[in-house]
Amino acid sequence: MTENTRDTRYQVSADRNSATRRVRYVETNMGDAADCTLCQLDDGTIGSQPTITNQETNMKLSQDIIDEIELIALFPNDSIQEGLKIHSSAAPQRIAAAERLFNKGLISQADGGYLTSSGMQAQQQLLALGSLLQF
């Protein structure tokens, strides 16, 4: 294979110790410097913190979301072998919350069951938030 037939869009530097930033990435030499986030950070044209818009900060919790959060909080957090059973005589909002969590893939059954791996992550985040807010 000759040098001319090689794809020259990508370059890899062998001298990683002299870099000002040690990151793993593949850089193309066909792009514009304005598109390079690292270049913009070096130039100071963008800040190091992401910009948050007003739309992202005005989070409102609907009653459905609150019901789902309350149901996730009811699952035992000390054992993955314990779950919940939502009986047909439970409050309608609790039954609906369980169905929504099941449809979102957070619990294993429409009437409770166990937390899935995503459900366990959601519960861990909820516990972290609870410890921050001390509730």
Image (cartoon, grey):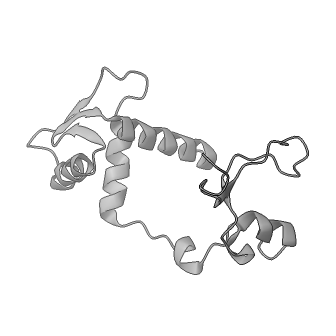
Image spot of residue 6 (x, y percent): 61, 53
Q: What residue sits 18% from the left and 54% below the top? A: 96
Q: In this orientation, which residue lies closer to the viewer: 14 or 90?
A: 14
Q: Is residue 5 left or right of residue 40?
A: left
Q: In this view, does 21 lie to the left or right of 29?
A: right
* Residue projecting furthest to the right: 18
What residue is drawn where x is 15% and y is 54%?
92
Position of 116 relative to 19 (above/below) = above
Which quadrant would the C terminus be assigned to in this image?
A: top right
Quarter placement of the N terminus: top right
- Name above or below for residue 101 compared with residue 75: below
Residue 74, position as x, y percentages in the image: 34, 37
37 and 65: which one is in front? 37
Q: Name which residue lies at 27% across and 51% down.
A: 104
Q: Which of 68 and 4 is in front in this view?
A: 4
Q: Residue furthest front?
A: 2
Could you say where residue 8 lies in the image, as x and y percent from the top left? 65, 59
